[in-house]
Amino acid sequence: MTVPLEYFVIVAAALFMTGAVGFLIRRNLLVLLMSIELMLNAVNLTLVAFNRQHVGGHAGQIFTFFIIAIAAAEAAVGLAIVLAFFRLRSTVRSDDADLLRN
Amino acid sequence: MEALKAQFPATNFTLLAVVLALPLLGAFVNGVFGKRLGKAGVRLMALSALGGSFIAALATFLLLPKGEGGGSLSWTAWRWFSLNGRMGQTIPIDVAFSVDAMSATMMLVVTGVGFLIHLYSSEYMVKDPGYHRFFAYLNLFCFAMLTLVMADNMAVLFVGWEGVGLCSYLLIGFWFGDEKNATAGKKAFIVNRIGDFGLLVAMAILLYYTGTLRFSEINASARNLLDPVTIWPFGNLPLEGQWDAANPNANGLYKAIVHLFLPEKGVQVYASTLVGLAMFLGAAGKSAQIPLYVWLPDAMAGPTPVSALIHAATMVTAGVYLVARTSAVFLMSPAAMATVAVLGCATAIFAASIGLFQHDLKKVLAYSTVSQLGFMFIGVGVGAFAAGFFHVFTHAFFKACLFLGAGSVIHAMHARIHDTDKSQDIRNMGGLKKFMPITRWTFLISCFAIAGAPPLAGFWSKDEILWRAFSTKIVAPEVARDPLWTWPSWLGQAIYWVGVVSATMTAFYMFRAYFLTFHGEFRGWKIVAGWKEPKHGHDDHGHDDHHDHHDDGTPLEGPKPHESPLAMTLPLMVLAVFAVFAGFLMAEPIHVEPLGHILSPVFTRAHDAVVLRGEGVEKLMWPMMGPGVAAFLAGTGAAMVVYLNKGGAPEESFKKAAPGLYRLIYDKWRIDELYDAVVVGMVDALADIFTAADKWLIDGVLAKLTAAIVAFFGTVLRTFQTGRVQVYGAAMAIGLAGVGFFLVRPHADATVDDSKLRSAGEVVISAAPGPGYTYRWEGTGTEQKDFSAAREVRINVNPGETKDVKLHVRNAFAQEATHSFAITRPGRGFPSSAAQPPLVPGTVVPAGGGSIPAKDIPGLINPRGAQ
């Protein structure tokens, strides 16, 4: 017995919404980065799930690997930025990143 | 001779290239290598260039076809460019030169007098550090002047015209270290620009009406210029009546305003008058006539040989040459000729009156030149082209001699007086006849010549001009339309008498200058026998360069003034000989006129147009010589009494009796001040207006307004740029949601191709593509139950029939949308044609309206399409 496709999609949608809402309403840069990871992984989940429907092809899974790699790179760069920002302003609140304003 | 003739055929007369190339080569070599060549080398180059050019010019003159019909020698260098005429014809403009009797004579004057003046300058300028520069300019001037006189068409003439203007500018401002000289050069250049504008306009009109710029063709087709030109209202503005007819519904105020600007009746003149006046403006600029004469007296700031060559003998006569060259054009317009003659006459007497009391020797000569140029314009203005040109010829000799004599005097004065103004002031001279005999005698001879003493050169030419003014009238050409303006009978005689008065003044001021310079006691400095030059030398500056070491109030002392060296006196003697004998080249009353004989074919058209004023006038030729001779005697006698016998006392008493008038004449009637106030003031005022407009309108309104608009939008847009990542993220999320919503909705759009509706009744409807779209068509004839991928459907409609077609679109999410079309084909009664414009999409009426909108019906029954 296999888990129906809809379940995967629903879980992925929930994950994605969690990530999106978290990204929009939280102010901690580290949480923002984690929210982005959540959204990327939601997409990964849908890709893998849909790939199962597509017998004989592995494009979705390959895509997932790519996304994981990119997510790793993004996290590295993002954390570096957060670290630099913290050294500069002694905070990780996104609202305080306003050096270029006005 | 025969060998030369065979070598240089008349239509490919390459000797002209030699005449032109030598001065150009001289200018190049002296200009580029002059500094390294040293003074001897520069002198050799300049003199041999001009000498060779003179020999070639002489050969040209001798090879000129003689005989009744005249003839010319021509050489075409290359095709310059070509234009399109008003008839659509191609007008070639060549760099071509052609020489007839008049240009050959001018060539001899330019190269001959030019050579003498080069020779003179080689000594006069010897102490100047800019020796090579001077000769480069002088050679370049000769090249440009030769281009001007040898030009076959007006385009080449214009090159020479501008070239001499440039050299004149460079040489007036030769000692540019002095602000005054540089200003004088600029003044000459700018005043000449005004004239050049006139010349360009004249060229454009000639090109339009005669379709050529070649002098021979212009003169041959001058009658084409008898075409009326509307000069007001200009452009294509209508007359009042025409405007009213075109705008019948204009209301009162609008009409009144327009009427304010549009004339009731147009003003028309003949094109020939327009060309003549525009050309005269050019001539007046170059030849220093009223109203553009103001630059010439200031041009005396240049070295004296320059004044002799450019501003007396050659360049300033270019205007006279131009008028004589295009004589046929002027003969087509008596009004233009009258303008030339009257302004020439006015210049003659006006400049002569200014010359009466000038103290600067060169200024006297300068105003004398302006006045004599006026005489030349009287000549060409009354139709005596040969006489006017003859005065150019004789004037070149005696005026060059006078200027070089003045230069010789200034050279002597410079031994002790280094200030330019003081060394040229005749009040500082006097008694020089003892010290400078050659200068004195040549100067005296030239004075006699310019004053018109028989039988010297000036007498014959001036008398000829005055006699022609008195005795002839100009026959206006026959025209079908309004007759041309003709001369009133008194005009010629009035010009004659004004000319006689100016001639009297000429004699007076020339002999005034002569007596004050060469007679009486020397007033320059105290002459000390055996005087030694003080320690400080003044070797390394030029003659007119002023370093006055002695301006401390103590009276100057010095040796006797010295006569100039041979290189300077030789040209004086040669020119004086010509000043005596040149008149016999065209002495009409005694029937010795070889020059007149060869010039006559050049002005054949003047023979018919300029006729004797009445029966028996020719008998007055000898009697009418009387006033001319009397003018010479009166002027000379008066000068002799005032300045020789009474030592200038009457001038002093006149100065005391009428100080205002004396001052006014001395200040040249304050014309410069008038121009300064009117013209320069006007330009300044205009500039002020533009500055204000720039400051308030451009900067104040336009620039600030655009800045304010940009700033406003910036303020608005800035509120969106919070700098908060989450706000951007939210905007992106909302935007993506919007795009997603749009993509999820089905859209039933279609384009209708009805180009074959009229002819074949066929319409093709293609639905727009979309993600996962399938289509179903209704009402196409073949029933379709299910959605399919067929995007296009072809429908046939019978004439007069209307079909309703319905499109259903379903997308990947199984949502549907519909769109209805009503296709109507016009009935059989209508003509049909593929040439008709296709039905605009407006005729495809969406569901609900089954008929064609009323506004499109006329297009459907357009009878134009009937086949």
Image (tube, grey):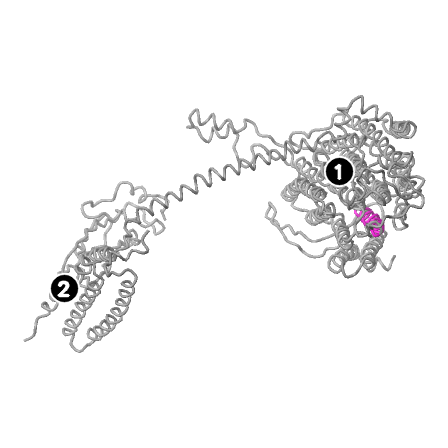
Q: Of residues B609 and B159, which is closer to you in this image?
A: B159
Label 1 amino acid?
Pro
**Which numbered marker is on residue B158?**
none
Q: Is residue B620 visible?
A: no
Query: Does the stretch in magenta take in B108?
Result: yes
Q: Is residue B701 left or right of residue B659?
A: left
Say which element carries label 1. helix
Which residue in the protein does label 1 denote?
Answer: B297
Label 2 amino acid?
Ala
Q: Position of residue B495 (x, y in %)?
A: 78, 28
Q: Residue at x 11, y 66 (%)?
A: A11
Residue B538, compared with residue A47, is above or below; it is: above
Q: Quadrant of the N terminus of chain B?
A: bottom right
Q: CA distance from mark 2 to mark 1?
A: 98 Å
Say which element carries label 2. helix
Residue B329 lies in quadrant = top right
**Which numbered marker is on residue A13?**
2
Q: Position of residue B718 (x, y in %)?
A: 31, 49
Q: Is residue A4 left or right of residue B589?
A: left
Q: Of residues B218 and A79, which is closer to you in this image?
A: A79
Which chain is mark 2 on? A
Q: Is residue B569 visible?
A: yes
Q: Of residues B47 and A20, which is closer to you in this image?
A: A20
Q: Main secondary structure of the magenta part?
A: helix
Q: Position of residue B90 (x, y in %)?
A: 62, 51
Q: Quick one: label 1, few (<14), some, or many (20+) residues within 10 Å?
A: many
Q: Residue at x 78, y 53 (%)?
A: B131
Residue B472, compared with residue B125, is above or below; it is: above
Residues drawn in magenta: B103-122
Residue B599 lies in quadrant = top right
